[in-house]
Image: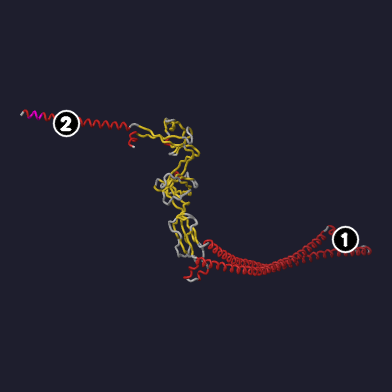
C-alpha cells in the first residue's frame, strides 16, 4: 500500500518536472521572440535622409485665385438668307413655284464630323440654279425698263409743273405791280393836295403877317387919324370964312379917299385870307374823299394781291407736290432696280460653281437641309463648333471679382491633361450676381481659350487661375525647400559630398513657390531633404 503511494508520488514528481521543463522552453521562446521584435523596432528607428536636386527658376512669379468651370464650344452658323423671290412668283401655280428656288443635289457632311474651312457642304442642281438666275435676270430687266419709263415721266412732268407754276407766279407778280401802282397813284394825289394846302397856309400866313406888321399898323393909324382930323376940320370950319370951308372940305375929301382906299385894301386882304381858308377846307374835304377812295381801292388791290399770292403759293405747293411725286416714282424705280441687281449679284456670289463650302473649321453640330430639299425660306445651312472660339465659364466670388477686368490673362489646366497649361483671356464679366446659397455671392466670368485647342472637347472640366499678384523677372524656388530656423530662411546646397544649409533672403510666395532675393542665383542647384527610415528602405 505504501509502495503504491510512493509510486504515485514519483509519477507526479516526474510529471511536474516535465511540465516545468516545457514551461521553461516556452518562456525561452517567448523571450527570444520579444527580443527579436525589440531589435527590429530599434532598427526601424534609425533615420536616413534623401536629397532631391532642384534648380532655381527665373521668371514671373504669380499669385491668384483658382475656380473650376466647364469648356464650352463657340457655335458658328452659316445662314441662308437670300431673297430670290420675284413679283411673278405669286402668279405661278403651286406645282411650279419650286422652280424658282435652289434645290439640294448633294450633302457632303454630317453631324459630328470635323470640317475645315473650304470643305464642301452642299451642291445644288444646275437646273434650279439656271431657273433662279433666269427669274432674277428677268426681274432686273423689267426694273431697268421701269426706271427708263419713270425717268421720262419725271422729265416731262417737271417741265409741265414748272410751266404751270411760272404762269401763276407771273399773275401774282402782275397783281403785285398793280397794287404798287394804285398805292403810288393815290399817294401822289394825296401828296399833291397836301402841297396845295401847305401853299395856301403859307399865303394865309403871309397875308396875316402883312396885316399885322408894324409899318402897316402905323399907316392904318395915320390914315385913321388924318381922316378924323379932316372930319374935325370940316366941322370946325362951318362958321369961318368960305375959303376955310372950301379948304377943309378938300382936305376931308382927300383924307376920306385915302381912308376908304386903305380899308378897301384891308378888307380885300381879309377876304383873300378867308377865301384861302375856305379853299383849305375844300381841299381837306377832298383829301378825306381821296383817302376814302384810297382805302377802297387799296382794299380791292389788296384782295386781288392776296388772291394772286394764295394762287402763287398753291401753284408752288402743287409744283413741289408734283415734283415730289415724280421724284418718289423715280426713286422707287431706281431702288427696285438696285434691289433686283443686288439680288442677282448676291445670288451669283452665293452659288458660284453651285457648291457651298464651310466658312470655318470645327465640329458639325447641325445640317439644315437634306438632298432634294428646296431652299424656300431663310434657315441654317450648317452650324459647327469652332475650336478657336472655346470658352470656360466660372463663378468668381465678390471679394475676388473686383480685382479682375476684361482682357486680363489667366491660366487654365484641364483635368483630362494633367501637367498641361493653357492660356486664356477674360472675355466678359457679368455684373449680375448669382447666389448658390445665402452666404456666397458670385459673378459669372467667361474666359476665351487661346492657342491650340484641337485636343479639347465641350464639357471638359477646367481649373482657371486668375492672377491677382505677380512679380516679374525674379528668382524663385519651391517653398517646401526652404528651412526656417531661428527666424532665418535657408536652403540645402551641396558642398563636396555633404549638403549644407545656406542662408538666403526670401520675398513673397504664392503658396507653391517663394521668391529668393539674395544668397542664390537663377540656375543654381538646391536640394529638398526628405526623411526616410532604414527599415522602410529594406522592405523596398
State the colouring used for the structure image: secondary structure
Please give the residue where the numbered disc 1 appears in the rendered image. Answer: 226
Image quadrant assignment for residue 335: bottom right
Q: Which residue is pictured at 47% across the width and 42% down the height?
A: 468
Please give the residue where the numbered disc 2 appears in the rendered image. Answer: 19
Over which residues does the magenta segment extend?
4-9
Q: Quarter holding the C terminus?
A: top left
Q: CA distance from mark 1 to mark 2?
A: 214 Å
**Percent position of residue 114, x then y:** 45, 55
Does residue 394 lie above or below 531 as drawn?
below
**SS assignment at label 2:** helix
Q: Is residue 539 left or right of residue 458?
A: left
Q: Is residue 418 magenta?
A: no
Q: Which residue is pictured at 38% across the width and 33% down the height?
A: 49
Q: Is residue 451 left or right of residue 29?
A: right
Q: Is residue 160 left or right of residue 472?
A: right
**Percent position of residue 9, x then y:** 10, 29
Does residue 366 lie above or below 177 as drawn?
above
**SS assignment at label 1:** helix
Question: Mark 1, mark 2: which one is toward the viewer?
Answer: 2
Amino acid at each position: 500500500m505504501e509502495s503504491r503511494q510512493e509510486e504515485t508520488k514519483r509519477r507526479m514528481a516526474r510529471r511536474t518536472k516535465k511540465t516545468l521543463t516545457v514551461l521553461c522552453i516556452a518562456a525561452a521562446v517567448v523571450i527570444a521572440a520579444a527580443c527579436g521584435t525589440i531589435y527590429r523596432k530599434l532598427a526601424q528607428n534609425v533615420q536616413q535622409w534623401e536629397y532631391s536636386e532642384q534648380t532655381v527658376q527665373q521668371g514671373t512669379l504669380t499669385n491668384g485665385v483658382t475656380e473650376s468651370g466647364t469648356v464650352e464650344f463657340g457655335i458658328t452658323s452659316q445662314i441662308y438668307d437670300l431673297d430670290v423671290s420675284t413679283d411673278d412668283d405669286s402668279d405661278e401655280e403651286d406645282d411650279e413655284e419650286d422652280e424658282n428656288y435652289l434645290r439640294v443635289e448633294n450633302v457632303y457632311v454630317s453631324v459630328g464630323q470635323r470640317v475645315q474651312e473650304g470643305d464642301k457642304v452642299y451642291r445644288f442642281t444646275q437646273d434650279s440654279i439656271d431657273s433662279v438666275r433666269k427669274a432674277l435676270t428677268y426681274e432686273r430687266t423689267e426694273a431697268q425698263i421701269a426706271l427708263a419709263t419713270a425717268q421720262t415721266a419725271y422729265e416731262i412732268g417737271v417741265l409741265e409743273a414748272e410751266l404751270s407754276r411760272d404762269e401763276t407766279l407771273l399773275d401774282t407778280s402782275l397783281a403785285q405791280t398793280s397794287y404798287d401802282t394804285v398805292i403810288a397813284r393815290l399817294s401822289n394825289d394825296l401828296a399833291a393836295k397836301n402841297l396845295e394846302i401847305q401853299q395856301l397856309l403859307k399865303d394865309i400866313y403871309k397875308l396875316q403877317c402883312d396885316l399885322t406888321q408894324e409899318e402897316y399898323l402905323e399907316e392904318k393909324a395915320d390914315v385913321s387919324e388924318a381922316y378924323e382930323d379932316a372930319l374935325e376940320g370940316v366941322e370946325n370950319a362951318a362958321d369961318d370964312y368960305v375959303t376955310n370951308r372950301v379948304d377943309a372940305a378938300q382936305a376931308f375929301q382927300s383924307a376920306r379917299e385915302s381912308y376908304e382906299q386903305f380899308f378897301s385894301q384891308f378888307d380885300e386882304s381879309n377876304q383873300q385870307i378867308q377865301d384861302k381858308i375856305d379853299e383849305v377846307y375844300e381841299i381837306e374835304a377832298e383829301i378825306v374823299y381821296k383817302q376814302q377812295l384810297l382805302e377802297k381801292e387799296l382794299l380791292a388791290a389788296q384782295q386781288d394781291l392776296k388772291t394772286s399770292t394764295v394762287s402763287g403759293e398753291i401753284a408752288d405747293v402743287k409744283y413741289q407736290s408734283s415734283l415730289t411725286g415724280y421724284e418718289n416714282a423715280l426713286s422707287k424705280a431706281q431702288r427696285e432696280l438696285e434691289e433686283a441687281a443686288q439680288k442677282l449679284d448676291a445670288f451669283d456670289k452665293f452659288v458660284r460653281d453651285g457648291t457651298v463650302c464651310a466658312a470655318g473649321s470645327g465640329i458639325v453640330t447641325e445640317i439644315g437641309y437634306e438632298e432634294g430639299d428646296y431652299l424656300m425660306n431663310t434657315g441654317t445651312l450648317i452650324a459647327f463648333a469652332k475650336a478657336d472660339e472655346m470658352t470656360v465659364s466660372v463663378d468668381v466670388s465678390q471679394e475676388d471679382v473686383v480685382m479682375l477686368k476684361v482682357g486680363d490673362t489667366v491660366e487654365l489646366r484641364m483635368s483630362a491633361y494633367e501637367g498641361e497649361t493653357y492660356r486664356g483671356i477674360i472675355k466678359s464679366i457679368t455684373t449680375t450676381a448669382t447666389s448658390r446659397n445665402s452666404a456666397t455671392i458670385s459673378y459669372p466670368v467667361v474666359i476665351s481659350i487661346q492657342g491650340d485647342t484641337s485636343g479639347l472637347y465641350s464639357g471638359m472640366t477646367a481649373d482657371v487661375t486668375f492672377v491677382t499678384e505677380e512679380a516679374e523677372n525674379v528668382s524663385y524656388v519651391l517653398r517646401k525647400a526652404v528651412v526656417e530656423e531661428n527666424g532665418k530662411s535657408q536652403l540645402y546646397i551641396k558642398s563636396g559630398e555633404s549638403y549644407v544649409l545656406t542662408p538666403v533672403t526670401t520675398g513673397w510666395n504664392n503658396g507653391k513657390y517663394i521668391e529668393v532675393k539674395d544668397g542664390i542665383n537663377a540656375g543654381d542647384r538646391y536640394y529638398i531633404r526628405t526623411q526616410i527610415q532604414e527599415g522602410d528602405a529594406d522592405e523596398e
